[in-house]
Structure formats: structure tokens, C-alpha cells
Image: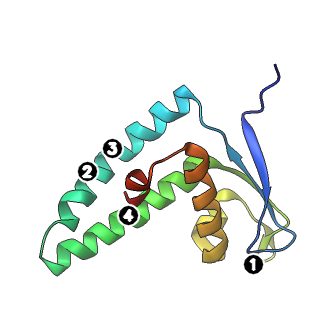
Amino acid sequence: MHYESERTFEAASAPGVKYTIARMSLGRRIELTRQAWELTGKAECLQASEDPREKLEAATLAAEIDRLYLRWGLKRVEGLTLDGEPATPESLIATGPEELSSEILATIRRECGLTDEERKN
């Protein structure tokens, strides 16, 4: 058996761009769960509040969770420059096109095998 721990995809939202993500493994699932656990729980509590400030903080935490998934899963970006420099996972998150980041995030979550309920968080 031959197993690749990464998968490469052609970006639908950015022609000519490829991105490589890490595939799920037991160790990586434990790592991701540990990193997301506290943020997810706090976001759920804040989302249940009626206070607009707490709802805004919940939305901010949801975005932080998205960033965590991107940092955890995105290994490489090819065929994209940002401000004249080759894109890296960090530069894509910081200054790249949001549509591409959203596409990659959806791929990472799909490859993680998350349920619809887990994806909400």
C-alpha cells in the first residue's frame, strides 16, 4: 500500500492556482481537536447570548477557528503571487483573496470528514 499524507487540488476560484492540504490522520485529528476545543466551546456560549457584543465576539471566534483550520491544513499554494511575492499559507491567510481562502477551507473541512454540525463550529 502506498499512502500520501497530502493532497493537491486545482483551485476553482483562481484558475492556474493549486493548493496542497494535509490529509487527516489520528495524530493530526488529536492536534486539531486540541487546538479548536477551547475556541469552539467559547464561540458556542457567546452565540447563545442575546448581547450583540457577545454575538460579535462569537463571529470573531468563528473566523479565528477558520484561520486555525487553514493554518493546520494548508501546506502549499502554487501559481499565486501576493504583492509580487509567491504566496505562502500565511500570506494567503493575511492578504490573499478571501474567495480562495474560503474554497481551501471548505476542502480542508470536507477532507477532515467533519459533520454538518461540526462544520458550523
Vertical order, 105 against 102 (above or below) = above
Label 2 to label 1, Cα distance in Å? Answer: 37 Å
**Number of residues whose C-alpha sits closer than 10 Å to that of mark 3, classed few (under 14), some (14–19) or many (20 or more):** few
Picture coordinates of residue 103, whole percent (x, y): 64, 66
Instruction: Name which quarter of the figure residue 112 lies in.
Output: top right
Q: Is 5 situated above or below 105?
A: above
Q: CA distance from mark 1 to mark 4?
A: 27 Å
SS label for mark 4: helix
Disc 1 from disc 3: Cα separation: 34 Å
Q: Is label 1 or label 4 in front? A: 4
Give how far across and how far down residue 35 sits, in percent.
41, 42
Q: Mark 4 near mark 2, Cβ–Cβ under 8 Å?
A: no
Evaluate if marks 1 and 4 touch, with contact meaning CB atoms under 8 Å apart: no
Q: Is residue 116 left or right of residue 76?
A: left
Residue 47 image position (x, y, % from top left)? 22, 67
| Residue depicted at 60% across the width and 76% down the height | 98
Which residue type does callout 1 highlight? Answer: Asp
Amino acid type at circle 4 is Ala
Report the Cα–Cα distance between label 2 and label 3.
6 Å
Q: Amino acid at mark 2?
A: Gly
**Is residue 107 toward the left or the right of residue 86 in the image?**
left
Q: Which residue is mark 4?
A: 62
Q: Quadrant of residue 81?
A: bottom right
| Residue at horizontal 53 percent and vertical 27 percent from the top | 27
List the residue tagged with mark 2.
41
Which one is earlier in the sequence, the residue at label 3 or at label 4?
3
* Residue under pointer 1: 83
Q: Secondary structure at mark 3?
A: helix
Mark number displayed over residue 37: 3
